[in-house]
Image (cartoon, rainbow, N blue to C red):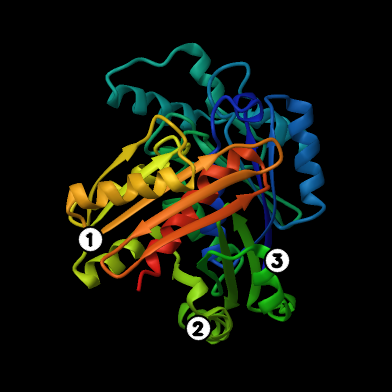
Amino acid sequence: MPSAEIISIGTELLLGEIIDTNAPYLARLLRDIGVDLYRKTTIGDNTKRIAQIIQESLQRCDIIITTGGLGPTVDDPTREAVALAIGVPTEYRPELWEQIQARFLRYGRQPTENNRRQAYIPQGALAVENLVGTAPAFIVDQNGKIIISLPGVPREMEYLMQNQILPYLRQRFNLHGIIKARVIHTAGVGESQIDDMIGDLETMNNPTIGLLAHSGQVDVRITAKADSESEADLMIQEIEKIVQQRLGDMIYGADQDTLECKVFETIQNKGWNLVVLEAGLDGDLIKRLVSNPVSYLGGKVLATLPGPDELKELTLSYWQSSHAKVALGISLIPGTEKQDIFISLVTPNEMQQLHHSYGGAPGNAPRWAVNHALNLLRKLS
């Protein structure tokens, strides 16, 4: 399988002024057509630095995709940087200037003279017409290595990838394979415990198994390389069965499944409904639940941080006054070395009081607490 690197160009990306959504989009597309992605790099609008990183990438991979820096202004350096990297000048393409003028005419505008800069591309490059914008893309074949430069506007980049670049890559590299991933979600258990239970699977080469830890949730990613989607699915299914056998009810779903959706499934299957009280979470638990007004009757954010006894009384009182079948109260009390999390749960069958201590980064404590509370609701008996 060919290998690739993505270079996101733009000082505004480098300095965090805007979020780069192009690189994740490209990464998923490359994965799906069976291209190994080795690196993603973000670099500012500096011609020499961009050229240097392109030259370095040419030593490592088969495909380089750049995004951004194809606009009409002097700080759009990608054309010159690619030309510098491969040791050629840029050249004017009259047909590109005609395309640019036609695009402006369609928009009811006239191009300014600096738009003519977009009609220059590295000498010998293959021009790619941009039907949804004014910046032409281009492809350079450098001794069998491919450099693809795309505009940074997401809508334009996505259109060109789907309609021009993917067909080109499939033909150029005879791509018939696929890389497919499935993400299994767990809750109520830490990364080290998951690793202890499936660590032997993490040494596999194909499929590969990886862990991604969040606060109060750990994902298990299974990635398979195969000649077809059906073959990849079968490879993933075989490993997923093993993971399910070992992790059991620690698993709450996969891919697009959310913990709150599983909570609603549990409550709806019982014919119940839910109210919540929260303190110290900035309304995060309520925000996760408001999407289902059928099962979720409402919630309150408390102005104070009640301890376990007061939280128990408040939760019981809310359960009685709301006529809900389930009431959950949670209070996050910050400390200097750890955060204390108190939970009270009332159902028609029981009343529980739980205490957890969280010693991680204080900013992660609310999400950790919310995920543990939702996992408790998911497993209601």
Q: Residue at x 61, y 66 (%)?
A: 173
Q: Residue at x 53, y 48 (%)?
A: 341
The image position of residue 232, as x and y in percent, is 52, 79
Mark 3 secondary-structure assignment: helix
Q: Write the residue at 79% across / 28% down.
A: 48
> Which circle's residue, 2 or 3, is located before the other in the chain?
3
Residue 20 % position (x, y): 55, 37
The residue where tag 3 is placed is 192
Residue at (27% x, 47% y) in the render? 317
Which element type, helix, strand or loop, lies under badge 1?
loop
**How far from the left and from the top, in percent, is residue 226?**
57, 79
Q: Is residue 100 left or right of residue 360?
A: left
Left or right? Give the position of 333 relative to 288.
right
Disc 1: which residue: 325
Image mark for residue 154: none
Distance Cα–Cα, label 2 vs label 3: 24 Å
Res. 127 in view: no
Label pair 1/3, CB-CB below 8 angstroms? no
Callout 2: helix, strand or loop? Answer: helix
Q: In the rendered structure, which amino acid carries the disc numbered 3? A: Ser
Per the image, the residue denoted by label 2 is 237
Residue count near mark 1 (Cα–Cα under 10 Å), binned few <14, some 14–19, many ≥20: some
